[in-house]
Image: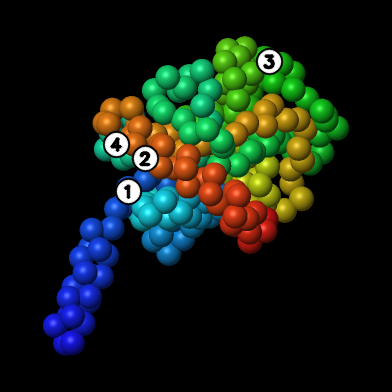
Amino acid sequence: MKRIFLSVLFSLWAASAAAESVLIGAEDDWAPYSAIVDGEARGFAVDVVREAFAAVGVQAHFEVLPYVRCMAMAKAGQLIGCFDAVPNHLIDGHYLWHAQPLFRARMNVYALASSREHGLSAQDFEGKTVGVTRDYEYGDEFDLNTRIRREVAARNEQGFRKLLAGRMQYMAAEERIAKALFARYPAFAGKFREVGTVATPGLYVAFTKSVPQGARYLNKFNEGYAIIVRNGRYKALENKWF
């Protein structure tokens, strides 16, 4: 009996040790979707990716790093994927994309609270200076319009500080990201208003094309994502975060 018991324990240990895992890049500065908190990846998108893979028996591990480096490492095959990315025409062909987005976002443009503008589209910003975060995607209508002047910042927070200081006319940012920043920094409270929306894109994990495992884990993710949508877990995560 003891021998059988030990055999079962060993089998369980061996199965655990052999559990499949995958390393995914997570952006460090896009709360509430993905950010570094106490040295770990936290956010709605992080939970979706983790649980989609878990639904098909894969344990997701995250390397949290700046978006530009995250995407470069995924492109080179140093990471299986990186999120959260918009597959516009500038990056679409460099990565593999899953069937359904992690979530949909609202890409807004903000001005100082004193502005009377509203309902602006991408074309309305031609000839004007709009702050953007380095290598972020804001939808093709905005990203491919060379008539829009861009003031590039390393982070959203820096861009809003430039806007507050009068160094540019507008700042582009995802709606929930902007609201989180306005709540986090007292200096931002009541200082900005949305004046237009340039896109409502889906956000994705950009899976690498450089190594065969990229396509394999893309398929795994598609399978797991469908499971958590069907069983209600995706909706529970939405309720948790929003």
Side (left or right) of 119 relative to 155: right
Residue that appears at 27% across and 65% down: 16
Cα distance, mark 1 to mark 2?
8 Å
Density class for disc 2 (Cα within 10 Å; few <14, some 14-19, many ≥20) is some
For the residue marked with disc 4, what is the amino acid?
A: Gln
Residue 12, percent from left and from top: 25, 70
* Mark 1 or 3, nearer chain start: 1
Cα distance, mark 3 to mark 2?
40 Å
Task: Kindly state the secondary structure of the residue where label 1 is placed.
Answer: strand
**Badge 3 is on which residue?**
126
Q: Looking at the rendered structure, which numbered label has been put on residue 22?
A: 1
Cα distance, mark 1 to mark 4?
9 Å
Disc 4 and disc 2 in contact, CB within 8 angstroms: yes
The correct choice, above or below, for 217 with respect to 126 in the image is: below
Foreground: disc 3 or disc 2? 2
Residue 107, percent from left and from top: 66, 34
Q: Nearer the viewer, residue 67 or 202?
A: 202
Task: Kindly state the secondary structure of the residue where label 3 is placed.
Answer: loop
Side (left or right) of 36 relative to 168: left
Residue most extreme to the top: 147
Task: Kindly state the secondary structure of the residue where label 4 is placed.
Answer: helix
**Badge 4 is on which residue?**
213
The correct choice, above or below, for 227 with respect to 38 in the image is: above
